[in-house]
Image (tube, rainbow, N blue to C red):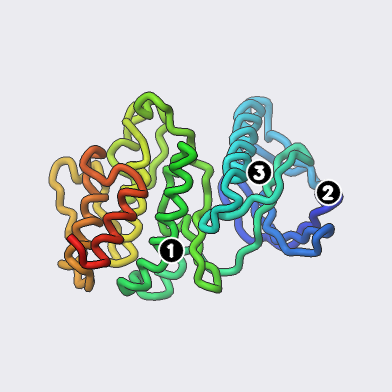
Amino acid sequence: MLTGRYRIGRVLGLGGFGITYVGRDERLHALVAVKEYYPSMYSVRMPGSSLVAPSGAEQAAPYRSGMEKFLDEARLLAQFRTTPEIVDVLDFFTENGTAYMVMEYLEGRSLQEVLNERGGRLPFAEALGVILPVMRGLARVHEKNVLHRDISPDNIYITNDKRSKLLDFGAARMALSQGEQNLTVILKRGYAPLEQYNAGGRQGPWTDVYALCATLYRTLSGQMPADALARIEQDDLIPPSRLGVAIPPAVEQALLKGLSLRGAERHQDMIELLGAFEVALSGRK
């Protein structure tokens, strides 16, 4: 029992930095998801107990630093409790030498899992039904001057009742007001734009625009976009229509603009991207 309130059950998922369990809130008599900070490369669980500790003296500093970043993620997500497209963080705290994040319990699958089950791609209307809500959620995130920086099919969750939820804000950072310089290097090849390959790259809302458009491209075409670095030498990004995707030309144009190599040539934020899609879908010019 954590904080005398949350009873821990089976493991839902394992990652390099944490373990997620199904839990029960004994005060509200409701299921929750409980994420435990447990960086496997830095920590060890004490035999016969729930206590977690750094695995050695050299691991103590990175363990503590990582735990503070874990709590930062929880604080950041707590700002978006009223945003339906973002997973709700209900509580967070430290206990057992580590940190915990209590989230709403969701039943469903990641977009990547859905793609794996469906032969690698989704029809146009179904794909938009997944991605457009995420655009709206990210628009609210950007209004708070926050960048996600790790959007991909793995981090979009589709609930059993067909709601889209954006997960994993572990890479998120506050965008710096003066040109978004000096953000750390975090990237996922195929989904990361060029500026994420350089610690001094100018990142902003347009960085998330690229990643979300890359995710939509992958969802429609069944193919991951070419790595941004490879596109510098020869930009061989194939339009989805040439890969057999039934997509209106105006929507394809809006999508490809979001995948421009240069950040200045993309839609500059999610509001602009969403507007471009809405205009394209309405048939207006």
Q: Residues within 10 Å of mark 3 (few under 14, many from 20)?
A: many
| Label 1, label 3: how far apart the Cα atoms are | 24 Å
Give the foreground label among 2 and 1: 1
Task: Kindly identify the amino acid type of the residue bearing the numbered disc 2.
Answer: Gly
- Give the residue furthest to the front: 284
Please give the residue where the numbered disc 1 appears in the rendered image: 112
Circle count: 3
Please give the residue where the numbered disc 2 appears in the rendered image: 48
Q: Residues within 10 Å of mark 2 (few under 14, many from 20)?
A: few
**Mark sitting on residue 37:** 3
Compared to 245, does 66 lie above or below?
A: above
Quadrant of the drawing holding the C terminus: bottom left
Q: Residue at position x 34%, y 44% from top?
A: 269
Q: Which callout, 2 or 1, points at the residue further toward the start of the chain?
A: 2
Q: Residue at position x 36%, y 49% from top?
A: 271
**Closer-to-camera residue (64/144):** 144
